[in-house]
Amino acid sequence: MSFWRIILKSLKHHRFSNGLAAISIAMGVALLVAVYSFKEQSHNAFTQVGLGVDAILGPKGSPLQIVLNALYHLEDMPGKIKWTYFNEVEKERIVAQAIPFVVGHSYGGFRVNAIDPRFLTEFEYLPGKIFSFSESEGGKGGPFSAPDEAVAGWEAARELNIRLGQTFNPVCGVAEGDPVHKKDNLRFVGVLAPTGTPHDRAIYIPLETFYGLEGHPQETALMAEQEEFREISGAYIKIKRIRGGALHPGIQDLKFAINQSDRNQLVVPAEVMPRLHNIIGWVDRVLIAIAIILTALSVLFLFFSLLSALREMRRDLALFRALGATRKTVMGLVVSEAMIISLLGGVLGLAFGHVLIEMGAHFIKVETGVGFTAGYVSMIDWLVIPGAVLLGLLAGLVPGIQAYRLGVLDNLSPVS
Amino acid sequence: MIIELDSLEIIFDSGKEHFKVLDIPHWQVAEGGQVAIFGPSGSGKSTFLHTLAGLLPISSGKLSVCGQALEGMSEANRDQFRAQYVGYIYQNFNLLQGFTALENVLLGMTFSPRKSDPEEAKRLLDEVGLSHRLKYHPSQMSSGEQQRVAVARALANRPKLLLADEPTASLHPVNKEDVLRILLDICNRHGCTLVLVTHEREVIGLFENTVTFLEFNRVYQGTVGG
């Protein structure tokens, strides 16, 4: 009978307490794995090179609010900017591409953004990636080419069960109860293939359509005809690259120049998002602290259950000694048992953690459009197995030492 | 001689108390011998057996068992010595409750230099008449059957010396002679030296060689067996 078979028998003999210890470790590890994965994935998602946007030209207001609105379809835009000003910025020598947009409408809970058609055909939403309508990739139809046409992001289309040719009336606003443009029947002509970005959670209509929607003030209609009156919510700006793919250093001068104005500002998402992380970072830290405490408590539970099991095992261990097992061997049995329970807890926790991510990812995707995947391997995933073995070793050390010190004759047969 | 001792002393020293448990000037047992050590409770019989098994360190004197000098031997080496040369049978069987009869016997091979051999374990259980109880747990067997499993386990490492500590004391009178005869017979077949301690007069009747521990700390001197 091998050393491992003896351990297996012992694990089986105390399966209830061992199972509880493994499950409690698994819970702590699962929480740790899930929190770390969400933390890293959200950090990656919110720093995806500004989702293809180097800068956002927008009105004065909170830069964070502008980023959340323009890139994540959350919050409201704090105002509008003049089309003529946008034209000036677009002509700046370091600007490679400028995509104007107007926000403020919605349909079925999803934002409806009026946007320059180049957004759908030329704009790189991530480096080297433009939107696709290919059916093999999950898309349908094509980009809009007429004012009454619209394109849905993949998640919006899925949630609202949008079919090509289906018409809808946009809501003038993003809050419940806002008025509906009842006379404007827009038609879906395309669904974007999934991108794993918040762009999946929006509906896009041509920029000029916004100005012609029924019910808007007369000044808005005038914006369509006369450029000097025209306003937009903002524009996605791509900056030219210099050698090595770095942003043109002139972006700082441009930002400084734009920010001097009373009405406009240039927001660089890569500078703003870390601030968001600082704000929500404490939530991560609290969750990680809870997970660590939970894991520590479960290891403590393992420690006490081993001590308790050791009391039952004294005679067995003494018998092993009587049969020729050395002190080191019996100590090895106890410590190995602790390490196996902890390892089992670690492996289960890793699996549970990824199940938790899969469940949470669906919820977050629906709420924010940010794609999380259970397949993501975070730094903590690599540490779980060696960490679990180490924790098992620590939990088993004191019971192991007690087993080492166990007297053979004190725990065996009565003497005659 | 399989056991040879000179001026053997076992002294228990608890710090406050210091007393001599065994003091044996000279004793030896020839290979293949079957010896019963008889004496009342507390006369030091078990202590003597534990000393022969290397479970207790020797305070002074010389003790050679199976050609191994136990005096001055480290505890780890005594563990190895026991695993290789000694089989031990206890009054209360000391079978592991979570293990089957077969697994209990295999356990006797686990710590010895020999490889675990399930076929030999089965054969040993067959020799003690328990081939039909291989997968039974101790709680599913009678005390006589449990002691027979313990006999098979004690032989699992092919010991040269079998030590039996009151092996029949916990048995029903019907089973006592049965277990003893199996023990003596199996030792003969395996060429194994047997040293048995007992306080039961009826047990010593089955042995040609008997030594008597009269009372605590008294000694015996001589040669037996062979």
Image (cartoon, coloured by chain):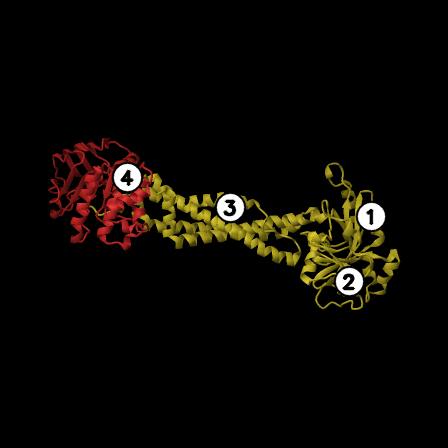
Chain colours: A yellow, B red
User: What chain letter is assigned to the residue under label 3?
Assistant: A
User: In the rendering, which numbered label is found on residue B157?
Assistant: 4
Q: Name the spot of residue A27 as percent of width and height, x first.
A: 49, 53
Mark closer to the observer (3, 2): 2
Mark closer to the observer (4, 2): 4
User: Amino acid type of disc 1?
Assistant: Glu
Q: Is residue B100 above or below residue B84?
A: below
Whole-angstrom CA distance, mark 1 to mark 3, is 50 Å
Mark closer to the observer (4, 3): 4
Q: Which residue is mark 3?
A: A384
**Local crowd size for mark 2, using a 10 Å CA cut-off: few (<14), some (14–19), many (≥20):** many
* SS for callout 2: strand
Query: A233 or A61: which is nearer to us?
Result: A233
**Local crowd size for mark 3, using a 10 Å CA cut-off: few (<14), some (14–19), many (≥20):** many
Residue A397 visible from this viewpoint: no
A284 sits left or right of A307 in the view: right
Q: Earlier in the sequence, mark 2 or mark 1?
A: 1
Which residue occupies 72% across, 62% down? A163
Whole-angstrom CA distance, mark 4 to mark 3, is 41 Å
Residue B134 visible from this viewpoint: yes
Q: Which residue is mark 2?
A: A187
